[in-house]
Image: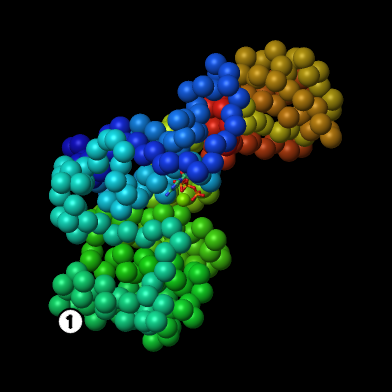
Amino acid sequence: MNKLDAIIVENLSKSFKSSKRKKFKNNSENKNNFKIKNNLIKAANDISFKVKEGEIFGLLGPNGAGKTTTIRMMTGVLQPTLGNISIYGYDLWKYSISCKQIMGNVPEMADAYLDLTGFQNLIYIGEIYNISKKERTRKANYLLKKFELYEKKDIKTKKYSKGMNQRLLLCMALMNNPKILFLDEPTSGLDVQSARIIKELIKDYNKQGMTIFLTTHDMEVANELCNRIAIINQGKIINLDTPENLRNLTQKFQAIDCYLEEIVDIKEITSLKAIKDVEFINNRYHIIVDDVNDAIYELIAYFKSKNVKLKQFNTYQPKLEDAFLEIISEEGGLY
Ligand SMILES: Nc1ncnc2c1ncn2[C@@H]1O[C@H](COP(=O)(O)OP(=O)(O)OP(=O)(O)O)[C@@H](O)[C@H]1O
Ligand SMILES: [Mg+2]
């Protein structure tokens, strides 16, 4: 059965007036990549994608790529210059209130109400959502416990650390049991413990069926959490796939390192079918391959035929970071 599309984004664009004009090389290769054209910054440039119900979808890109601009449009905070967004089939701008009722939103660098305690903040949000007194108290306590904030629930949030503040913002976003949770850089700048709590709870809520849309510049976060990742650079989506497929896009980092008891002829190894290139560095044969499995079989057979004993054998799979840098550099690099 096909999963429902929780979010459909079509041809979304947002231009901002630029106060400064930046100089760009005016050659034929980059003329379509101008960040500033006619004194306008194209922070989002014809973005389209669909987020399936129940998935964790990540928008991954470097600083200034357009992540916050995109998520702000998707949460109805910022009006697009062009394009459409639908939430469960409803146009976000036409049915703004109904759409927002099923969303939870944690914006980038937001604060809770600083003069209220963590508990009071949640109760206040519960009141806004018209949740009954009994239920909002129950939900607030439940979330505070779940996010390891219960001990600090009666402290004013101006005394909260960044990590505590971020966890409280998540609690606030979850008060209304949203169907879709939007998170702009959920773990950015947090210590390991807060980041871990947040990542585990994102996975947990997703397992219970919640659709999650998040932005991040952190490859590890995207890799760990997301079912699919859209890579954004200079306002454009330049690739969209599963973390695994994105990693596999980059072949050059699939490699095998061998330590051998004897010296072998590099040319002979290079001539094997599955081998692309070989370097001999510090007694180690660094072998670049197309397909790790094929290469392992071929190498073992070759070493056996030559009676060469293996001391050590390591394989390297490409990392998402390698794929990210490769894709971005193919698209003309970072800003
Ligand atoms: N309100 C605004 N007015 C003018 N320019 C803006 C505005 N908001 C964003 N921009 C510009 O749009 C571009 C995209 O910014 P955006 O904040 O969406 O990037 P980002 O990917 O979220 O970056 P970061 O990783 O630093 O959070 C940047 O060049 C930024 O300077
Ligand atoms: Mg941002």
Tell me which residue sits at (70%, 20%) in the image. 277
Tell me which residue sits at (36%, 81%) in the image. 116
Residue 152 at what x, y percent from top left? 43, 83
Residue 289 at what x, y percent from top left? 63, 24
Question: Does 274 sit left or right of 167 as displayed?
Answer: right
Relative to 12, residue 147 above or below: below
The image quadrant that residue 145 belongs to is bottom left
- In this rendering, does residue 231 appear at all? no
**Where does the N terminus fall, quadrant-wise?**
top left
Relative to 6, residue 276 above or below: above
- In this rendering, does residue 71 appear at all? yes
Question: Is residue 128 or residue 131 the one in the foreground?
Answer: 128
Q: For label 1, count other residues whose C-alpha is less than 10 Å away and answer few (under 14), some (14-19) or many (20+).
A: few
Which element type, helix, strand or loop, lies under badge 1? helix
The image quadrant that residue 29 belongs to is top right
Residue 232 at what x, y percent from top left? 45, 37
Tell me which residue sits at (30%, 53%) in the image. 77
